[in-house]
Image (cartoon, helix red, strand yellow):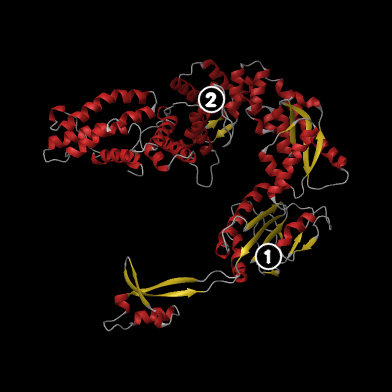
Amino acid sequence: MAEYLFEIGCEELPPKASNILREHFYNFFKEKFTEFFYTESSENIKLFSTPRRIGIYIKNLREKSPSVIQTLMGPPYKVAVDNEGKFTKAAISFAQKNSIPIEKLTKITTDKGEYIGAYIEREGENIEDFIKRVVPQAFINLPSLKSMRWNETNFTFPRPIRWILSLLDNEVIEFEIAGIKTSNYTHLHRFMTNPVGRGERKEINHPSEYEEKLKLGFIIPSFEERKKSIETQITGFAKTLDAEGIMDEELIDEVTNLTEFPVGILGEFSPEYLVMPDEVIITVCKHHQRYFNFKKNGKLIPKFLAFSNNAVRDRDVVKRGYEKVLRARLEDALFFYKEDLKKKLEDNIPKLKNIQFHEKLGSVYDKVLRNLEFAKNIATLIGYTDIQKLERSCYLSKADLLTEMVKEFDELQGIMGMYYALKQGEDEEVAKAIFEHYLPRTADDILPQTLTGTVLALADKLDTVISFISVGEIPKASADPFAIRRNAIGIIKILISKQINLDLSRITDNIQVLEFIKSRLESFLTSEGIPADIVNAVLSTQDFDPYSIYQKSKALMELKNNPEYEKIVMVFKRIANIVPPEFEGGLNINLFEKDEEVKLNEKLQSIKPVFKSYVDKKDYQKGLLTLLELKPYIDSFFDNVMVMVENQDIKNNRLALLKEINSLFRDIADFTKIIGG
């Protein structure tokens, strides 16, 4: 079995570009080489990536792809064969055009009729020819990234390409990318091998040598191994400090993408900086220096861990350099902190009029006022009564945008507002709400904990979604510069996680906005494991309460556990399908002719108030169980009563009865959307 190694070497890639390209090349090679694998296995492809390289090691390869039988369809049989059974000019022309011997032509019968054609065996492709033809295609449709041009070829890539390795067993497969011809050479660590700056040029004689030779050259080529090394070093240093390392997954991934041989160096900073909130120090360390922090008994300690890409002999020199740079950044932060505390947050509120939120939506101050109106409306609808706290937190919510700290470290907006508010004697819940109104900031972020913060977070996000969509700023498939999707998902997560019933149609009558949020809700519910047909069935009703929709979906999921589920759905569907959408007739019990009509109506009227009470209480599970009591009566009705009779009054009365039942079903879902039954 053959083995193939591909490596593209370049100048250091930005971490995000490295992540995207790693996934792109892995998926490309996995898809393209499928027909050459002897067996399907997760070990067929191994992916390597460092800041300077992306490597693909492929095993278990055939020398040649399997031959395939190809069906070539020609003209219709009656056109290709005459009355004497001989091939016509149309058939002969088809054979000549496709280089098919005339004796290979045969009748092929399809769903669309009979044709003349041929079954041709196409030989498989040699792996060498395949690699030459296909591998360069990996560079044709690269993901959308900021790219560079660096030579006369005008080839674009996130960073200049310096070498390309393409090795099938012990043979170089030749092709060219960006003016660079393939070889069997790679380069070892830029600083730990000679020549320093480029790294030793190392010959790879066989793909199986690659990983070991890189490791001997001070490169850990596996992203996962480097990541594990970084995590182990953080844990190890934490143990020596009798502390806990802050395992920031995002930062760990970034440092993994910045190093080929990560070496942890422990440093310290002056305890005087600990007067600042932990988030300030952590932000300075993470976003500006890429250092890791430690906590002991829940409190930050004046230690940090940096990672060098070089195992230098005198680490104290490097350590002092790291400490010097961090000290300067922390000194700036401390200065900002002290200066900000000299001013009251509320003094910044009028100045928000000078910060543009959006050219069509006014200033940040205008947004604060809109947020307050939304917040008051939400408060009324969900029964929140502490309007004074709500107003105070809303007015202060954006004030920290004008603080020196947030101007320098915009990641701290909301966080600094909370700390400054507490320092200035604001109510604790008001202060927390200033921070919480931004939550959740990402897909896996925490949610607001206080009720005031929850209301304000909903208001802020609803204003963002409603305002931007109202002025035509609709998110595109590839771009959402105002984070409208993220804010819509934030609304949904808060309402569902906090179990808040809020009818969004009472917040806005903009159908485009409501449908946009519903579309996000659809994605959210399916990601939660709820089948798409159930989601569609519930969303098809005129319910704009995300938590209510979630509850109904869960109730229908529970119904699926009923052994009679398929029959239940079939009966509900039958009723929904038999009543014309435009039907408006009313029910008249004096027109009943059959005992089954009478009994069905009596049962319907008896359960209706019970069902409605459960729906009012949002107990959809019990509501559905109540509806199930109708099933035997409905079965009996359909077994013994003809709906579409000639007598129009009788027919319309029976339709009116079924419509009344269907209206109850639609309080939960449109059962015609459910698959099955």
Quadrant occupied by the C terminus: top left
- Marks 1/2: CA distance? 56 Å
Q: In the rendered structure, which amino acid carries the disc numbered 2?
A: Thr
User: Residue at (57%, 61%) from the top-left corner?
Assistant: 39
* Quadrant in the rendering for residue 586: top left
**Left or right: 65 in relation to 328:** left
Q: Which residue is mark 2?
A: 454
**Left or right: 49 in relation to 633:** right
**Residue 143 on image: x %, y %:** 59, 53
Q: Which residue is mark 1?
A: 166
Q: In the rendered structure, which amino acid carries the disc numbered 1?
A: Ser
**Residue 169 on image: x %, y %:** 68, 67
User: Residue at (69%, 49%) from the top-left corner?
Assistant: 223
Quadrant occupied by the N terminus: bottom right
Label 1 vs label 2, nearer the camera: 1
User: Residue at (69%, 36%) from the top-left corner?
Assistant: 247
* Quadrant in the rendering for residue 187: bottom right
**Residue 418 on image: x %, y %:** 64, 23
